[in-house]
Amino acid sequence: MTSFAVIVGVLCVLLLLGFPVAFALGIAGALGLVATGQSLEIVPEVLYSAADNFVLLAIPLFVLMSRILMKTGMSDELFELINAFVRHIAGGMAAGAVLCCAFFAAISGSSVTNAAAVGLVAIPALIKHGYPKEFAAGLVAAGGTLGILIPPSIPFIVYGAITDQSVAKLFLSGVIPGLVVTVLILGYAVIVSRVRGYGKPGAPAPWPERLRLLVRNLPLLSLPVLILGGIYAGVFTPTEAAAAALAITLALALFYYRRLTAVALWEATRETVNVSVMIFAIVAGAKLFGHVSTTMQIPQGFAAWIQAANITPAEFIAATMILLIFLGDFLDPISIILIVVPVLLPALGALQIDPIWFGVLLVINMELANITPPVGLNLFVIQAIQKDLSFQEVLRGTVPFMFVIVAALALIWWEPRLATWLPALAR
């Protein structure tokens, strides 16, 4: 245990020094191998085994699909469609931005991509129609976090690979909680807009315009049905669904919307490679670190301590959520999942905590991680695309929505069936 504490200390020091998470995990893991008398020759085998998982192949496919959607401006089409139905209502444009975030989440799987794609079009439109810029930025930053809760979700894919849980069931488990978070964010945004007089309701869109936009975007609207329907009908595995969705997205961008240029495709591919390599490098580093912790029997020892201390499941969940909120201030969601979950997994079994339900609580907690400083990625994305906003202004606009997400977390904790009912039907 003392040796492991030293290794964890080394990891923390490396992270504080600014080392990339993957390298910090790899160095700490290598030191752990030496400390336990194992040969460094097993490092290549451990690293290879980390990526040797068919489920993880869905990650670059979903990332590329989301980048193509963003580069070709399909999010603009989506926002225009939703806005046509709600822009005449007080607070309607704010509601439209949240709905756009929710729908885009159902085809992107990424919080950062969701915030960027919707923010590029929604924030300027909100500001133009009288919404304070801080409120507009906070709304889209928080709405963007739906990208990792509403399926398909990259964190759910990673969590499923670590815990050996069905990714399809994890996707199902995120549907109702995703709707809950959407409704809470939307409700708060509309109430605040009406109470404070934010926004100027526009003229109602004529029904011919609404129908034209609806018909034009039917292929885009069908993507979530293809992804999720294909998985739950047994036609696709999650990885095969990602490949099919990518192929259809490419076809739409090339032949239907006709917006995919060679430059846009190159940029989308380059960004996909960067993101995917980063994720897989973290997976590999975490695998090595996890191998060391397993060799030292840290997860088993932790589970035994939990049982001996007579800690209740509620106490364990409360302590874990507080820990995750703290870690979310300093690490990205994927890193947290890869570092923490292998240690906690035996304890979940010992306390008979449903790993599907815990996965949903974990991902909602990671939504907070994406909007809490100093490593809240959505905050930086919004600040980058809205140059006249400072980081502090984006943060101030986001703070109220943090409490909304905490309320959603408490609700799913209080009523687990919101997360477990749909997966139970699939058994």
Image (cartoon, helix red, strand yellow):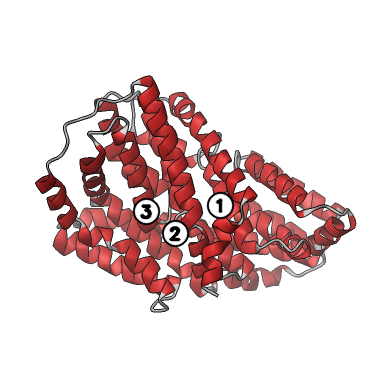
> Residue 33: in sight, yes or no?
no
Which residue has dot 1 on it? 363
Where does residue 51 sit, x and y in percent of width and height? 54, 69
Where does residue 234 sit, x and y in percent of width and height? 42, 78
Determine the residue located farthest toward the left in the rendered image.
Answer: 208
Q: Residues within 10 Å of mark 2 (few under 14, many from 20)?
A: many
Determine the residue located farthest toward the right in the rendered image.
Answer: 308
Specify the quadrant that holds the N terminus: bottom right
Which residue has dot 3 on it? 271
Q: Amino acid at mark 3?
A: Glu
Specify the quadrant that holds the C terminus: bottom right
Give the SS element for disc 2: loop
State which tag comes first along the sequence, 2 or 1: 2
Q: Amino acid at mark 2?
A: Pro
**Is residue 174 shown above or below 242?**
above
State which tag comes first along the sequence, 2 or 3: 2
State which tag comes first along the sequence, 1 or 3: 3
Q: Which residue is more in the foreground, 306 or 250?
A: 306
Q: In the rendered image, which quarter is residue 79 located in?
A: top left
- Give the mark toward the camera: 1 or 3: 1
> Residue 2: in sight, yes or no?
yes
Which residue has dot 2 on it? 151
